[in-house]
Amino acid sequence: MSYQKMAVCYDTQSCIKCFACIVSCSTENRMRLQRDYNYSVEKSMVEPHHHLNYLRVECNEKGTFPNVTQIAAFKHCQHCENPKCMDICPTLAISKKDTGAVVIDADKCIGCQSCKDACPYDVPVFSKDNGKTYKCTMCHDRLTAELPTACSAACPSVAIFSGPADEVIAEAEKRAEHYSKVFNKEYFVYGADKVNNTIGTLSYMTIAPIENRDDYLLPADPSNGVAASREVAKVVGAAAMIGTAAAIAGHAVYTAVKYDDKHHKENENE
């Protein structure tokens, strides 16, 4: 069964920094332990399970008193159009759903952390508890049940909202345009348009002032040095293999020619 493409958006301007989204996200993931792995309520809720905190916030302040702005930058899976983590996973544990969600299958994950190396946003978290890697699932199970994501359902100021991708993008662009006029500085929707040629668009977008994009962890051209070096290694390795094959072929031709010349001379002498 196919599902409609969905999206989530974080509106930095409407956020009141209550972080109810973080609590809701963690709670939802702990309840999944009860549903999928028969954990007891006590075990799922009381034990740490730090790797299940898919929404992580980095707070800092900009400006000087009294003109100070608190920045709450969320670090989470962006659910790329072209997920590099999926491409690099050796066990095919990562898949992209019809909803746009990029999901890790914990049962297939071997904990090699290749996805962490490949992620341009450095998102996946490795759990030492069970040797698996985790990240945000964009509440794929909730979206397919026509429910909002856990983070958006808990947000009291609708700073995080989810739904069909076209509706989310339309609302996000409307808000960005409004904020640009009201605050006299340009706001944009990060991820609505192609971020770069490598990852494409994002299913988890962010509304923020362009001048603060780095503060909100929204790089203009995200890339991962490890992943890039691996790609270079692949190219160099392929070139080396081709070069080796060419050298072997050349040597074979040279040997064959020498062999023919030798026998030709021997025949002439006879």
Image: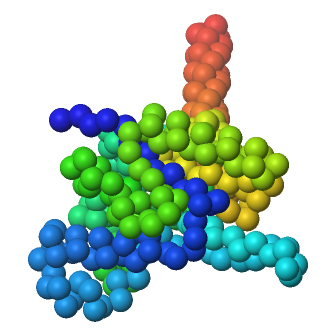
* Quadrant location, the N terminus: top left
Question: Toward which corner of the image does residue 131 lie, by quadrant?
Answer: bottom left
In the picture, measured across the screen, residue 228 lies left or right of residue 159, that is right
Q: Is residue 215 visible?
A: yes
Residue sitting at the far front: 182
In the picture, measured across the screen, residue 203 lies left or right of residue 131, that is right
Residue sitting at the far left: 38
Q: How is the image coloured?
A: rainbow
Judging depth in this view, the residue of 80 and 231 nearest the camera is 80
Residue occupying image coordinates x 41% and y 60%: 152
Residue 192 location (% of width, % of height): 57, 39
Q: Is residue 94 visible?
A: no
Residue sitting at the far right: 64
In the picture, measured across the screen, residue 140 lies left or right of residue 80, that is left
Residue occupying image coordinates x 23% and y 34%: 2
Judging depth in this view, the residue of 196 and 127 nearest the camera is 196
In this view, 258 is above or below 248: above
Judging depth in this view, the residue of 207 and 219 nearest the camera is 207
Residue 72 location (% of width, % of height): 63, 70
Residue occupying image coordinates x 80% and y 75%: 68
In this view, 184 is above or below 139: above
Residue 66 location (% of width, % of height): 85, 80
Residue 221 location (% of width, % of height): 71, 47
* Quadrant location, the C terminus: top right
State the count of labels: 0
Residue occupying image coordinates x 61% and y 45%: 175
